[in-house]
Image (cartoon, rainbow, N blue to C red):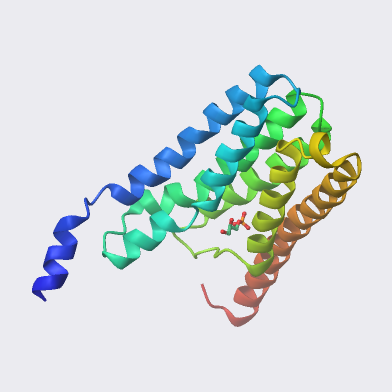
């Protein structure tokens, strides 16, 4: 008991949210590095890729601390999933600004991510639209594809790195669309079942 109390006192209540906000603030910094580098393979491009990897890889640390020390807040529940989408969304936008990724890819991804997030908030008082396994896989696929696209590996290991980038990006985009459709289908089915059973 005393040990628990000491642990609770040792962790500031706002630490998880501070970590989440720090992750979100990495987004404009790595976008700036990316754009200043302007598509060259310079050191800033590697720093931009490294910052993206650190920010995206620390997903879960904030939530883990909040749960472990029982300091989960509504703000944290709101901010945590948004942090991932800000990081990946900014990376997609940066690559399109540089002309390294077609704008239609970025627009399709943003429409899916913003659409599902907004829908999740709209229905929150009715039911929780939990992250599905395909959505989680999509986030991993996007993170891998963006890391490979941001880090100029082709300068180190040759052109075949570009082919790996293209294949991983296609997989990420396909999973982004498929997981979005998966949510829509499950919501439509759920609504039909509710109507059929008369449940609210
Ligand atoms: O399917 P989404 O957009 O809710 O994303 C899933 C989460 O990123 C999983 O952590």
Q: Quadrant of ligand 1?
A: bottom right
Out of 32 and 199, give the one closest to the viewer: 32
Residue 172 lies, in percent from the top left, at 77, 52
Farthest residue to the front: give it.
156
The answer to which image quadrant residue 132 occupies is bottom right
Residue 41 lies, in percent from the top left, at 74, 27
Considering the image in quadrants, where does the N terminus appear? bottom left
Q: Residue at x 35, y 47 (%)?
A: 17
The answer to which image quadrant residue 151 occupies is top right
Q: Residue at x 81, y 34 (%)?
A: 155
Residue 124 lies, in percent from the top left, at 47, 58
The answer to which image quadrant residue 53 occupies is top right
Q: Is residue 108 left or right of residue 70?
A: right
Q: Is residue 42 left or right of residue 52?
A: right
Q: Residue at x 21, y 50 (%)?
A: 12
Q: How many marks?
A: 0
Q: Is residue 4 left or right of residue 51?
A: left
Residue 173 lies, in percent from the top left, at 79, 50
- Check the image and report above or below for 135 versus 37: below
Q: Is residue 188 left or right of residue 163?
A: left
């Amino acid at each position: 008991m005393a040990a628990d109390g000491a642990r609770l006192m040792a962790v500031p209540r706002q630490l998880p949210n501070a970590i989440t906000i720090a992750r979100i603030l990495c987004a404009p910094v790595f976008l700036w590095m990316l754009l200043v580098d302007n598509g060259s393979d310079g050191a800033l491009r590697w720093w931009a890729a490294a910052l993206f990897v650190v920010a995206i890889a620390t997903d879960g640390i904030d939530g883990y601390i909040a749960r472990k020390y029982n300091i989960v807040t509504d703000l944290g529940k709101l901010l945590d999933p948004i942090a991932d989408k800000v990081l990946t969304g900014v990376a997609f936008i940066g690559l399109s600004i540089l002309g390294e990724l077609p704008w239609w890819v970025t627009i399709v991804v943003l429409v899916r991510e913003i659409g599902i997030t907004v829908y999740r908030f709209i229905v929150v008082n009715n039911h929780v639209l939990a992250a599905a396994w395909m959505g989680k896989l999509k986030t991993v696929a996007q993170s891998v594809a963006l890391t490979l696209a941001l880090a100029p590996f082709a300068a180190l290991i040759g052109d075949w790195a570009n082919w790996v980038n293209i294949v991983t990006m296609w997989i990420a985009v396909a999973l982004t669309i498929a997981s979005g459709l998966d949510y829509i289908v499950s919501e439509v089915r759920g609504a039909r079942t509710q109507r059929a059973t008369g449940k609210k």
